[in-house]
């Protein structure tokens, strides 16, 4: 007899990144919301931290009429919250909770967590307390909502994302046992710490003990809440097979379901709009570069970029810069290359000298009958002609110091020029004044040579916007992309008569083999791919762009959402078993 699929009546999702754009989980939630909202309108409810009580949150619009009676009841219970809509496709309902009042109860909350689940909070520091109080508050929100509106006749799922929300999942499992709990780790605390501290992760993964490494790396409390949540919820999930292996070895728990991260194509402009916005993005990138460097880069320039969190080794920023340095000295390169490094750093705001030059250039262009922003340039480069924003401590910045070490001057004759953009591209950075996705449209090629990357949204976003990319076999997305390819048509070294062969022209994505010890080989391979891509004809480039877009189509949420349905069913069935015992 075939069992009927069991699906929830209500889904609650809790994350530090609900209406709080700080990382990849924001993209997971915000792009998936529309797909679930269409299936169960306003029964998908997100719970996030309320950081914006004294100022307007551009991602959230409050609706004081929605569930007004419940909000009053929650306030009587000591849970202060706001209800509204997340300003993303699907406009799902969001509850933002003020977690600050719960700091007064912190010791009691941690004591109960130890007694009930043996979660060690004694070694907490940094963001642990803030995240935990939010997580507890989120659990209280869902408990209050359930008691006010729902009962055991409704199938309810609570999904918690990352260690920051584990406490809330355990709270609900104890205090509202009829709610089925799911915990999703997007990257294990220990795995990220091992990789970030320069230790070999993959060759020795089988030999690491998670608890021992947590003590050595001083992340005992984060590891403890993550591990205990994974072992006690009704369904434990992660985002790729790469991280599933990591969970098994470091958390001693095999995930029940793997939830690959998809994308919603509504974020990508179409037709004439796409063409116009791509042209505008290229103009702005080249205009800023020429004004900063005193150069005359034109539209024939190959624009390459990497982006993401500023994790020097984990994100492969180190090997990206090394590959660019090798490309700079490669005699086979005949086309100018402008390489961007878009990673937010400790920046002190836009460079005033660059702002003034850009403003003067814009005023000058207005007086011309046929202004050409692509070829505009100043008579001389600015000091440090490779960075767009001031840094508080440039002497401690890894990117800046590497550029000095490589002797990067961005002189006019250099084949490769590098521009460091150390800020969030939110449309108001003071230099580009464009959003990240809008600038992404103007790129020709992206490079994400990650060493530690559980999934990898940046390469998926790249191909969704028809920009071919290079990633690695240590990224979940890279492994998935390889699975989508037909056979292995890669040569051993990629050369034919000293001309680098570019595999991007047929696949749209090149997945470079990466391990603990092949840094130099990865740098050489990226160099060869960049040089090879620069030699493609316009027709071959268009083939590569279409191949990238085809791959992105396969990663849409309408295909990947089925894995979430599987997780909901596992959680509901396990919760039913738990409650029947």
Image (cartoon, helix red, strand yellow):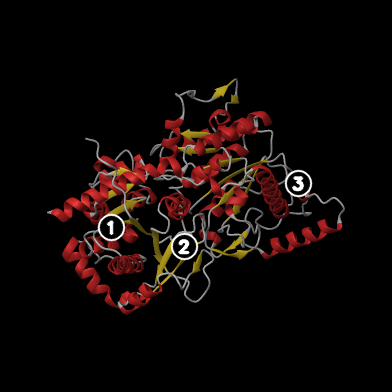
User: Which one is in front in this view, the residue at disc 2 or the one at disc 3?
Assistant: 2
Real-space CA distance between mark 1 and mark 3, rounded to the nearest whole angstrom: 65 Å
The residue that mark 1 highlights is 154
Residue at disc 1, secondary structure: loop
User: Which one is in front in this view, the residue at disc 1 or the one at disc 3?
Assistant: 1
Real-space CA distance between mark 1 and mark 2, rounded to the nearest whole angstrom: 27 Å
Binning the other alpha carbons within 10 Å of mark 2 as few (below 14), some (14 to 19) or many (20 upward) gives many
Residue under the point 78% across and 61% down: 360
Residue under the point 28% across and 62% down: 167
**Res 475 seen here:** no
Report if the CB atoms under discs 2 and 3 are less than 8 Å apart: no
Which of the 4 image quadrants contains residue 455?
Answer: top left
Real-space CA distance between mark 2 and mark 3, rounded to the nearest whole angstrom: 41 Å
Q: Earlier in the sequence, mark 1 or mark 2?
A: 2
The total number of labels drawn is 3
Whether 423 is drawn above or below 304: the answer is below
Binning the other alpha carbons within 10 Å of mark 3 as few (below 14), some (14 to 19) or many (20 upward) gives some
Residue at disc 3, secondary structure: loop
Q: Position of residue 151 (x, y in %)?
A: 26, 63
The residue that mark 3 highlights is 296
The residue that mark 2 highlights is 19
């Amino acid at each position: 007899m075939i069992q009927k699929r069991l699906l929830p009546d209500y889904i609650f999702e809790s994350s530090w990144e609900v209406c709080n754009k700080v990382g990849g989980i924001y993209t997971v939630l915000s792009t998936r919301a529309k797909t679930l909202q269409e299936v169960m309108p306003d029964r998908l409810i997100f719970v996030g931290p309320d950081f914006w009580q004294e100022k307007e949150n551009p991602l959230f619009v409050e609706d004081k009429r929605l569930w007004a009676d419940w909000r009053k009841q929650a306030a009587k219970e000591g849970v202060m919250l706001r209800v509204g809509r997340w300003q993303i496709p699907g406009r799902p309902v969001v509850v933002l909770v003020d977690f600050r009042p719960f700091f007064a109860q912190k010791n009691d909350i941690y004591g109960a967590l130890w007694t009930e689940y043996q979660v060690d909070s004694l070694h907490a520091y940094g963001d642990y307390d803030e995240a935990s109080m939010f997580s507890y508050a989120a659990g209280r929100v869902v408990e209050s909502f359930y008691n006010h509106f729902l009962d055991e006749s409704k199938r309810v799922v609570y999904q918690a994302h990352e260690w920051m929300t584990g406490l809330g999942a355990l709270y609900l499992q104890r205090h509202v046992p009829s709610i089925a709990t799911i915990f999703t780790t997007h990257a294990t605390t220990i795995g990220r710490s091992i990789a970030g501290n320069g230790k070999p992760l993959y060759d020795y993964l089988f030999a690491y003990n998670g608890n021992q490494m947590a003590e050595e790396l001083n992340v005992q409390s984060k590891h403890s809440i993550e591990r205990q949540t994974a072992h006690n919820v009704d369904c434990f999930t992660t985002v790729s097979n790469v991280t599933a292996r990591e969970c098994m070895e470091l958390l001693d728990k095999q995930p029940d379901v793997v939830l690959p991260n998809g994308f919603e194509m509504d974020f990508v402009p179409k037709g004439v709009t796409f063409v116009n916005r791509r042209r505008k993005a290229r103009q702005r990138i080249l205009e800023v570069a020429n004004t900063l460097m005193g150069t005359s880069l034109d539209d024939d320039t190959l624009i390459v970029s990497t982006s993401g969190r500023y994790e020097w080794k984990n994100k492969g920023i180190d090997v990206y810069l090394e590959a660019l340095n090798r490309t700079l000295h490669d005699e086979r390169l005949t086309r100018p290359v402008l390489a961007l490094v878009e990673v937010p750093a400790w920046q002190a705001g836009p460079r005033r000298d660059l702002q003034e030059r850009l403003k003067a250039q814009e005023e000058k262009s207005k007086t011309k009958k046929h202004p050409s922003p692509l070829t505009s340039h100043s008579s001389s480069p600015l000091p440090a002609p490779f960075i767009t924003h001031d840094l508080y401590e440039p002497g401690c910045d890894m990117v800046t110091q590497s550029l000095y070490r490589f002797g990067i001057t961005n002189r006019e004759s250099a084949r490769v020029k590098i521009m460091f953009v150390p800020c969030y591209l939110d449309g108001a950075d003071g230099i580009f004044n464009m959003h990240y996705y809008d600038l992404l449209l103007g790129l020709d090629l992206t490079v994400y040579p990650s060493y530690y990357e559980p999934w990898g949204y940046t390469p998926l976003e790249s191909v969704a916007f028809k920009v071919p990319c290079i990633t690695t076999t240590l990224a979940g997305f890279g492994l998935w992309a390889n699975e989508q390819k037909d056979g292995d048509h890669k040569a051993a070294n990629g050369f034919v008569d000293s001309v680098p062969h570019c595999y991007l022209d047929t696949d749209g994505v090149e997945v470079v083999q990466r391990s603990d010890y092949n840094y130099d080989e990865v740098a050489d391979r990226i160099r060869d791919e960049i040089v090879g891509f620069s030699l493609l004809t316009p027709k071959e480039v268009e083939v590569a762009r279409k191949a990238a877009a085809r791959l992105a189509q396969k990663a849409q949420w309408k295909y990947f959402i089925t894995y979430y349905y599987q997780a909901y069913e596992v959680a509901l069935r396990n919760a039913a078993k738990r409650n029947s015992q």
